[in-house]
């Protein structure tokens, strides 16, 4: 892409972005029945088992995310999910013979939590109110409210004062 074509894309970006926002909203509402008001989800988000996913008000989900709702996902009000995040409520049980069956537990992300880019949230986790999950963190255990966690496996590095 040359400089001229980039300029045209930026010159047209406002109306296109607005149209994509409406398309994303209607796609989200057509897939997930429990969507709160003013919630947004990027068109590139992969949604598995949408009937098992609930979203509160003002939830924003970034580009290239995966929501695997096999065992249930609940996103409370004002949750922010950055780009590339994977939220998987189930995995394969390797303890029984083929074909492997899915097993899982629900995931709850409470009010005001922010999930950083490329983080992974695994089955059975509850992320407390106003917690911040750092970019690239792998969360396999519950996170206390107002915590800031980073790393693989995650470790708490501070408290959110909200």
Image: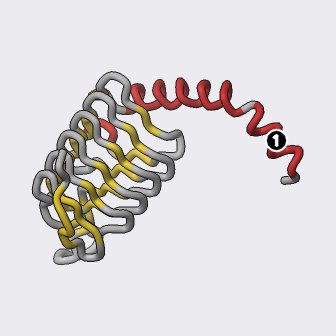
Quarter of the figure with residue 104: bottom left
On the image, the x and y values in percent for residue 126 come to 14, 53
Residue at position x 53%, y 39% in the image: 43
Using the image, determine if residue 4 lies above or below residue 85.
above
Image-quadrant location for residue 118: bottom left
Residue assigned mark 1: 7
**Which of the two residues, 41 or 117, is positioned nearer the viewer here?**
117
Relative horizontal placement of residue 28, taking residue 126 as reference (left or right):
right
Residue 10's quadrant in the figure? top right
**Quadrant containing the C terminus in the rendered view:** top left
Residue in the image at 28% along x and 59% along y: 133
Q: Residues within 10 Å of mark 1 (few under 14, many from 20)?
A: few
Name the residue located 29 percent from the left edge and 41 percent from the top edge.
79
Please determine whether, in this image, residue 149 is positioned above or below residue 71.
below
> Does residue 105 appear in this view?
no
Spot occupied by residue 1 in the image (x, y as percentages of width and height): 84, 53
């Amino acid at each position: 892409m040359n400089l001229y074509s980039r300029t045209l894309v930026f010159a047209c970006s406002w109306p296109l972005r607005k149209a994509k926002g409406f398309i994303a909203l209607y796609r989200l509402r057509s897939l997930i029945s429990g969507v709160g008001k003013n919630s947004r989800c990027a068109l590139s988000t992969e949604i598995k088992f949408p009937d098992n996913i609930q979203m509160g008000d003002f939830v924003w989900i970034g580009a290239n995310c995966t929501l695997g709702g096999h065992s249930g996902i609940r996103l409370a009000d004002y949750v922010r999910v950055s780009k590339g995040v994977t939220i998987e409520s189930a995995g394969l049980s390797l303890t029984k013979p083929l074909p492997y069956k899915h097993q899982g537990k629900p995931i709850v992300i409470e009010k005001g939590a922010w999930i950083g880019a490329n983080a992974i949230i695994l089955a059975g986790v509850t992320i407390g109110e106003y917690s911040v999950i750092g970019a690239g963190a792998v969360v396999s255990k519950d996170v206390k409210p107002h915590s800031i966690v980073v790393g693989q496996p995650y470790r708490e590095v501070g408290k959110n004062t909200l």
